Image (cartoon, helix red, strand yellow):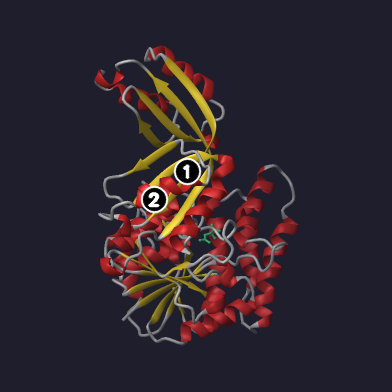
């Protein structure tokens, strides 16, 4: 059995956290491949190393001194080295970062130092082999991952029985140049590695005991989700639940490798298990409730447009031309509501509306900018009668007006649009009735 274990930044924030990792890794022989994020925050006022590296680059770009920021990076690592009595030439690594900054070197390489340093220290502390991500995570020139080459490269290093530590977040292009992933990318590294070595499980160690049914800022102490499918997780993360990098799902999903979200600070907790399929009989109707505020609705009406071939396509083309992502489209017969993330349209809003109105000869184009979307997710809703009816009456009874409704034919989620003022209240009502 092989377990790939990825530890997030908060699990590497200081020497106390390193000790917790050691206990976790050594408690099971199967925990063979360890992926590390850059050192994260120890407390609210602390900074993540990756953020500090971004800051150094920005200071350099605008001709300001970055010395104090680089010093903060150095001290954070030095503290860990001293506490754990590690033998590591940090001074030399800091010089390398400095020289890259000074000669305006590869920005991705500078940013990779967060994961590089934390992984070097972790491998020394755990007495594991260190494998550099640039030697095993292989990108194509278009930024996609070359899984075959990654597998080939990685297997060379996994021949011994020794556990290995690999930095997350970066890899290299075919010409050897270092390339990073998007923020939070160590999750993706873990998932790619689990895929290429056919791991039995991908453990993602963080600072919460799993995925909660809803946002703890809205419901205090919400229930934890024990088991969820990849598709449900996808729905939940698209609509705001922020647990795992969304690109981390595909590599493991393709090979049916379960993901286990675990808590480094409470390692005996089982966490949440993410799988392809589950036993339907034991499935509750609702797995999670999530959502987001601050959407904008553009309502478009034109008499007889339902008989106008390609009308919706022409509307969507306009958004495409302005590179504005459309979140949801709900329709009546001769009218359409296009739901957009407010922050993505702010500058073009009047131009877009004007273009829709004139070029498509619409009767009416109106705006509503106070919409929240609440997404009720559950594989258990499929083929179960009356769930949507109950949700809608519940909201009605609680004086909440539903502005939009959307449900796909796979019945895995129901999305309701309510006024921003009713966002928290909607989630609370659904949680109280269906989950608690
Ligand atoms: N250190 C990177 C970031 O802060 C990647 C990661 O932690 O997953 O985004």
- The residue at which mark 1 appears reads as 396
First in residue order: circle 1 vs circle 2: 2
User: Residue visible at 43% across and 54% down?
Assistant: 236
Can I make out residue 240 in this image? yes
Position in image of residue 419 (x %, y %): 54, 38
User: Residue visible at 39% across and 39% down?
Assistant: 405
Disc 1 to disc 2, C-alpha distance: 10 Å
**Other residues around mark 2 within 10 Å, as few (<14) / some (14–19) / many (≥20):** some
How many numbered circles are shown? Answer: 2
| Residue 390, numbered label | 2
Q: Is residue 63 left or right of residue 287?
A: right
Residue 240 higher or lower than 255, as above or below: above
> Which residue in the rendered view is the most extreme toward the front?
397
Q: Is residue 61 left or right of residue 335?
A: right
Disc 2 within 8 angstroms of ligand 1 (CB): no
Q: Nearer the viewer, residue 337 or 253?
A: 337
Q: From the image, which quarter does the N terminus lie in? A: bottom left
Q: Quadrant of residue 230?
A: bottom left
Q: Are marks 1 and 2 in contact (CB under 8 Å)?
A: no
Residue 28 higher or lower than 113, as above or below: below
Query: Disc 1 on helix, strand or loop?
Result: helix
Position in image of residue 96 (x %, y %): 61, 62
User: Residue visible at 57% across and 76% down?
Assistant: 265
Q: Quadrant of residue 74?
A: bottom right
Q: Nearer the viewer, residue 249 or 40?
A: 249
Residue 423 higher or lower than 242, as above or below: above
Query: Disc 2 on helix, strand or loop?
Result: helix
Position in image of residue 320 (x %, y %): 39, 29
Q: Nearer the viewer, residue 1 or 67?
A: 1
Q: Quadrant of residue 139?
A: bottom left
Can I make out residue 181 in this image? no
| Residue 306, numbered label | none
């Amino acid at each position: 059995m092989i377990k790939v274990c990825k530890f997030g930044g908060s699990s590497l924030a200081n020497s106390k956290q390193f000790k917790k990792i050691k206990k976790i890794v050594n408690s099971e022989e199967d925990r063979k491949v360890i992926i590390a994020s850059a050192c994260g925050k120890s407390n609210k006022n602390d900074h993540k190393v990756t953020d500090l590296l971004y800051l150094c680059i920005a200071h350099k770009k605008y001709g300001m001194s970055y010395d104090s920021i680089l010093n903060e990076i150095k001290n954070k690592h030095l503290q860990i080295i001293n506490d754990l009595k590690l033998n590591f030439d940090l001074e030399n690594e800091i010089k390398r970062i400095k020289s890259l900054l000074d000669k305006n070197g590869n920005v991705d390489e500078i940013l990779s130092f967060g994961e590089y340093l934390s992984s070097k220290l972790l491998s020394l502390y755990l007495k594991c082999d260190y494998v550099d991500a640039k030697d095993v995570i292989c990108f194509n020139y278009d930024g996609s991952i070359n899984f075959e080459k990654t597998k080939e490269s990685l297997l060379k290093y996994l021949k011994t029985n020794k556990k290995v530590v690999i930095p997350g977040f970066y890899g290299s292009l075919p010409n050897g140049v270092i390339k990073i992933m998007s923020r939070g990318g160590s999750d993706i590294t873990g998932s790619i590695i689990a895929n290429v070595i056919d791991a039995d499980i991908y453990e993602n160690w963080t600072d919460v005991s799993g995925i909660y049914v809803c946002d703890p800022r809205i419901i205090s102490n919400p229930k934890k989700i024990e088991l969820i499918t990849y598709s449900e997780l996808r729905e939940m993360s698209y609509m705001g639940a922020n647990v795992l990098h969304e690109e981390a799902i595909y590599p493991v999903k393709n090979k049916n490798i379960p993901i286990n979200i675990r808590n480094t600070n409470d390692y005996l907790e089982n966490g949440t298990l993410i799988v392809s399929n589950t036993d339907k009989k034991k499935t509750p109707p609702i797995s999670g409730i999530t959502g987001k505020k601050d959407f904008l609705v553009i309502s478009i009406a034109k008499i007889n447009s339902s008989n106008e071939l390609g009308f919706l396509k022409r509307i969507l083309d306009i958004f495409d031309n302005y590179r504005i992502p459309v979140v949801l489209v709900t329709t009546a017969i001769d009218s359409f509501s296009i739901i957009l993330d407010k922050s993505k349209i702010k500058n073009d809003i009047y131009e877009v509306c004007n273009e829709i109105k004139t070029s498509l000869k619409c009767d009416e184009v109106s705006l509503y900018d106070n919409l929240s979307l609440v997404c009720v997710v559950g594989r258990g809703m499929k083929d179960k009668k009356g769930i949507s009816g109950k949700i809608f009456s519940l909201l009605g009874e609680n004086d909440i007006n539903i502005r939009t409704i959307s449900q796909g034919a796979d019945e895995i989620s129901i999305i309701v649009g309510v006024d921003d003022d009713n966002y928290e209240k909607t989630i609370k009502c659904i949680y109280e009735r269906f989950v608690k």
